[in-house]
Image: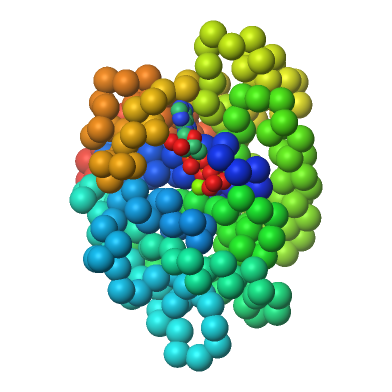
């Protein structure tokens, strides 16, 4: 199983949009995928699940001391074949208080208890706190969405330092790529921001840029990924290209459905 955390402590840079649409893209390609909503705002959860359908959440699995259920009890099928989701809850904010070493490895231990997934994507909250620490201890890869504006660039350096620091307890940790999101092709600031990000991080920046596309904003209200909501939109094409580029970096098949590939 490959684990990818979608992280940036800056709010509103496209983490959830990226996590949901990469996860959907991987599932559509036939990869059995789990999306873990580690943000107590629950945006990923409500993108795919009706709140009434949820009984056990990640807060039950990760927060508190006694009688915590196993992660498998907090996993729900979505309407997309091959895509399951571990939902969040407002109480997951309590994870910020999990400062004991044993507590910080709860997500890692929970993910290691699972079988059968090709990918796990973790949608992280907008902070550099203990919840992000749990994600960085549990993951192999980090994908960093960066909004194509000036201010979001500043926080990315802090995130990079946090990832470097977490390599001590998690030596395999690596940034798989920075992805520029919400890119307005007519806006000069966006073009400058893209250039600056490329200067700062070089080849680690994905070639694919996610353009500003209103369909990416409306899809969650219909509980849909961009592929179902607006298959011909820029948003759909950009996330499809990003998913392929990401699979290329992982040296995994991006064109043939994974199940067919495995059967060969
Ligand atoms: N490429 C895009 N084009 C247009 N709107 C976008 C794009 N990407 C994201 N958005 C919108 O921007 C807002 C913030 O995006 P999103 O929720 O994905 O960011 P986030 O980093 O997860 O935010 P938070 O830090 O609050 O969790 C949302 O309303 C989303 O629909
Ligand atoms: Mg989010």
Using the rendered image of the protein, determine whether residue 36 is visible from the camera's viewpoint.
yes
Residue 28 in percent (x, y) is at 27, 40
Q: Residue furthest bottom?
A: 66
Name the residue at 26% across, 26% down.
Answer: 231
Whether residue 47 sits left or right of residue 15 in the image: it is: left
Taking 6 as reference, is 77 above or below it? below
**Between 82 and 184, the one nearer to me in the picture:** 184
Residue 107 in percent (x, y) is at 53, 69
The quadrant of the image that shows the C terminus is top left
**Between 167 and 200, the one nearer to me in the picture:** 200
Whether residue 160 sits left or right of residue 15 in the image: it is: right
Which picture quadrant has residue 259?
top left
Residue 46 in percent (x, y) is at 35, 53
**Between 264 and 229, the one nearer to me in the picture:** 229
The quadrant of the image that shows the N terminus is bottom left
Using the rendered image of the protein, determine whether residue 247 is visible from the camera's viewpoint.
no
**Between 224 and 33, the one nearer to me in the picture:** 224
Which picture quadrant has residue 53?
bottom left
Taking 55 as reference, is 86 above or below it? above
Specify the color scheme: rainbow
Name the residue at 58% across, 72% down.
Answer: 94
Taking 210 as reference, is 135 above or below it? below
Residue 93 in percent (x, y) is at 56, 67
Name the residue at 66% across, 53% down.
Answer: 127
Whether residue 252 sits left or right of residue 144 in the image: it is: left
Name the residue at 37% across, 19% down.
Answer: 234
């Amino acid at each position: 199983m490959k684990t990818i955390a979608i992280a940036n402590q800056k709010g509103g840079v496209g983490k959830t949009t990226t996590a949901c649409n990469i996860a959907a893209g991987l599932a559509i390609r036939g990869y059995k995928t789990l999306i873990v909503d580690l943000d107590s705002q629950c945006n990923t959860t409500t993108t795919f699940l009706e709140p009434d359908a949820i009984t056990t959440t990640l807060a039950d699995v990760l927060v508190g001391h006694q009688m915590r259920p196993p992660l498998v009890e907090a996993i729900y099928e979505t309407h997309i074949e091959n895509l399951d989701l571990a939902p969040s809850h407002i109480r997951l904010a309590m994870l910020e208080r999990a400062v004991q070493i044993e507590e910080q490895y709860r997500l890692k231990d929970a993910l290691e208890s699972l079988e059968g997934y090709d990918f796990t994507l973790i949608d992280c909250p907008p902070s550099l706190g203990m919840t992000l620490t749990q994600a960085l201890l549990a993951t192999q890869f980090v994908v960093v969405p960066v909004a194509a504006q000036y201010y979001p660039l500043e926080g990315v350096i802090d995130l990079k330092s946090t990832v470097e620091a977490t390599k001590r307890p998690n030596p395999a940790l690596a940034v798989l790529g920075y992805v520029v999101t919400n890119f307005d092709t007519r806006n000069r600031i966006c073009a400058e921001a893209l250039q600056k990000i490329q200067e700062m991080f070089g080849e680690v920046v994905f070639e694919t840029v996610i353009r500003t596309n209103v369909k990416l904003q409306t899809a969650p209200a219909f509980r849909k990924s961009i592929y179902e909501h607006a298959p011909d939109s820029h948003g759909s094409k950009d996330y499809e290209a990003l998913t392929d580029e990401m699979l290329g970096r992982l040296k995994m098949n991006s064109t043939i459905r994974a199940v067919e590939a495995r059967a060969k």
